[in-house]
Image (spheres, grey):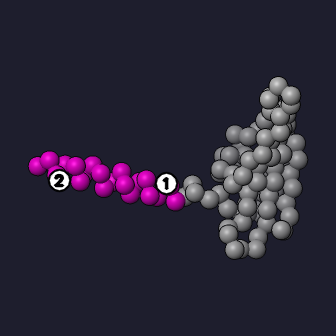
Amino acid sequence: MNRTSRLLSFAVPLTLAALVCGSASAVAGEVDMRDYIMLDEGMTEAEVLYRLGPYDYETVYSDYYHLPIRKRWAYLPAYGKRGWVTEITFDHRGRIQQIERYRP
């Protein structure tokens, strides 16, 4: 096996894996109703990430010393699609404090 074929046999699978993983994690998207009803106050950030995947937008509210007081994650519908916006607010311990769902 020459150098070029070894390089191609290694580079092609890595490129395909990067394309597949990159496109899947680019946009979180709208939360399905079956996933939304599984959310409950007191769940941790890790549980939410496991159930819903990565969020589209995060807002962190902090105090005078820059310590996080609460976080808000937003899951938005795809661009140009009229769907549901889901906002999840976490307290300083990383547990769900409030869950909101509305149409923009």
Indicate the position of residue 62 as horizontal and vertical percent values. Answer: 83, 34
* Residue farthest to the left, as pictured: 2
Indicate the position of residue 75 as horizontal and vertical percent values. Answer: 73, 57
Indicate the position of residue 88 as horizontal and vertical percent values. Answer: 81, 49
Residue at position x 72%, y 66% from top? Answer: 77
Residue 21: give its label: 1
The reply to whether the C-beta atoms of the residues labelled 1 and 2 are less than 8 Å apart is no
Query: Label 2 crowding class (10 Å Cα cut-off): few <14, some 14-19, many 20+?
Result: few
Quarter of the image holding residue 80?
bottom right
Residue at position x 65%, y 51% from top? Answer: 53
Using the image, determine if residue 2 lies above or below residue 81.
above
Judge whether residue 19 is colored magenta. yes
Amino acid type, mark 2:
Ser
Q: Main secondary structure of the magenta part?
A: helix
Q: Is residue 49 visible?
A: yes
Element at label 1 = helix
Residue at position x 78%, y 35% from top? Answer: 94
Query: Label 1 crowding class (10 Å Cα cut-off): few <14, some 14-19, many 20+?
Result: few
Quadrant of the drawing holding the C terminus: bottom right
Give the alpha-carbon distance from disc 1 to disc 2, as whole Å. Answer: 25 Å
Judge whether residue 7 is colored magenta. yes
Q: Is residue 5 left or right of residue 52?
A: left
Element at label 2 = helix
Residue 31: give its label: none
Viewer-proximal residue among 39 and 18: 18
Indicate the position of residue 38 as horizontal and vertical percent values. Answer: 78, 53
Q: Is residue 22 left or right of residue 85?
A: left
The residues colored magenta run 1-23
Residue under numbered circle 2 = 5
* Residue farthest to the front, as pictured: 64
